[in-house]
Amino acid sequence: MKSLPPRTQAFLWLMVCAATGVAMAFLFKDSWELDGGHHYLFARWSWTHPELFVGVWSRPLFTFIYAFPALAGYLPARLFTLLICLLTAHHTWRLAEDLKIERASIVIPLLWLQPIFFVYCTDNMTEPIFALVFVIALRLHHLGRVKAGMIVASLMILARPEGFFLGVLWGIWVLADARRSLKSRITLIPLLATGAFIWWLSALIITQDPFFIKHNWPPNWSLTGSAYGMASLYAYPVRLPEIVGLFMLPPFLFGLIHLLKTRRSFTVTSSFLSLLILHTIFRAYGLFGSAGYPRYLLSVSPAIALISLVGWNQIALRFAHRSHFFRTASVAIILAASACVDFVYADCIELARDAWAIAQVHSWFREHKLQFTITRFIWSEPYACILLDRDPWENPFFTHNRDSDLKLLRAAPPGTLIYWDERVGPKWIGLKAADIEEAGYVRLHTQSFVLNGFLNRSWFGFGGPRRQTMYLFFKPPEGKNDEIR
């Protein structure tokens, strides 16, 4: 039976990935991490607070691009991430063709079935936009459009801090290219500063502060801050199944070893290895406030997929003598098993389930409307702010010092509504429901939940029932406490 043309195969894979992404967007209502909701809020409210367009944590490239779909709402913004991921998959396939790697269309599922890519394909995180910029720049570089590739690569710093380190690596690639004169290579290097210059100039225009980026730098991102603790040097290597995929790990390792032995596709292998080594060191020694999340490697997910494709082809050679039915069935089983494992991985992330509880309490709040005007909204989880569509700048800048934060709550004006929870608020901010009542707020509503995943079971100790309690508090106008109660 004659196989389909490569372009048709790629198009079909993209359709399958698109359908999967849409299903994920509707099945899971919120981000897998608090950062996803924050980034959406930054983008949506950047029109009100222009400094967010050039903020360090809000990420200039993400905020600028998402500021438009975010106006349409949270779900459209998440579906926009799906579009970015589909474009990343498309360009990864085209790069595989540029590099003349066999079975290039298979790189699309090899990309999508990376657990971190699968999980964040409809999330408002910064790694997917970084991955898209990275793969476009890499394509331009390999097509001989070195200058254009460097300019695009310079934009990575606008998406994530890793852009600085990959920018340095890019400079090494250019300097090592003996096809140009040394003088010519050196004169190209400033192109890698294009993105940083755009950021600085934009910040100057918007804020009138030539040192805005320095002043806006998060305090817990210091060189030796250890804000999230430290781990062993094995912290990232042992999480490769989460990064690459459990069943995709053998092809990936085959491909990595083959490419290193044959000294091929150095740009691809060095991109992955550089970030893996850097984040391993950062996490082990508590540098740059590294939290050790495997999603950081999503930034170079196209490189991971290309390495896996090379290994996939190497393994395929060893089974070339087997029947067509056996090879086809084996591929189908491996891909299906990978998809199932990825869904289990997503379902085990308990934090995302809080959205269901927040939505139920929000429904209660809408049914029991306050007779008083809400002057300010304070929250522990960003999804509550998203549902009420309130300005995130209403939330105080908590200091994580209980006494100081209680003073902030007491200073809030009458009419302040607080949406708190039993787990995130105490863990990340340090305040419990009792603390808020102590600050002079009336409890409007309390609701407890047992939040199960779709699979309704625990896997290796993860993904079991999440017990959560949500609270609504209100600071009534003076003398109106009885009316609230």
Image (spheres, helix red, strand yellow):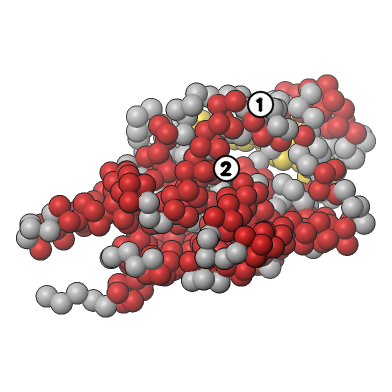
Camera-side residue of 299 and 410: 299
The structure residue drawn at horizontal position 82% and vertical position 44%, both measured from the top left corner, is 214
Q: Residue at x 32, y 64 (%)?
A: 101
Residue 203 placement: quadrant: bottom right
Would residue 418 be found to the left or right of residue 95 on screen? right
Going by the image, does 430 lie left or right of 134? Answer: right
Does residue 260 show up?
yes
- Residue 198: x %, y % from top left: 77, 62
Query: Residue at point 84% right, 32% down?
Result: 409
Q: Nearer the viewer, mark 2 or mark 1?
A: 1
Residue identified by numbered label 2: 33
Kind of residue indicated by mark 1: Ser
> Looking at the picture, does residue 439 appear above or below residue 135?
above
Left or right: residue 73 compared with residue 327: right
Other-residue count near label 1 (Cα within 10 Å), few / some / many at <14 / 14–19 / ≥20: many
Amino acid on which disc 2 is placed: Glu
- Per the image, label 2 sits on a secondary structure element best described as loop
- Residue 480: image quadrant is top right
Q: Is residue 251 left or right of residue 324?
A: right
Quadrant showing the N terminus: bottom left
- State which tag comes first along the sequence, 2 or 1: 2
Q: Residue 158: x and y, percent?
A: 68, 56
Q: Whole-percent x and y of residue 141?
A: 53, 66
Between 377 and 220, the one nearer to me in the picture: 220
In this figure, which residue is indicated by the disc labeled 1?
226
Q: CA distance from mark 2 to mark 1?
A: 20 Å
**Residue at image coords 72%, 40%:** 379
Mark 2 neighbour class, 10 Å CA radius: few under 14, some 14 to 19, many 20 or more? some
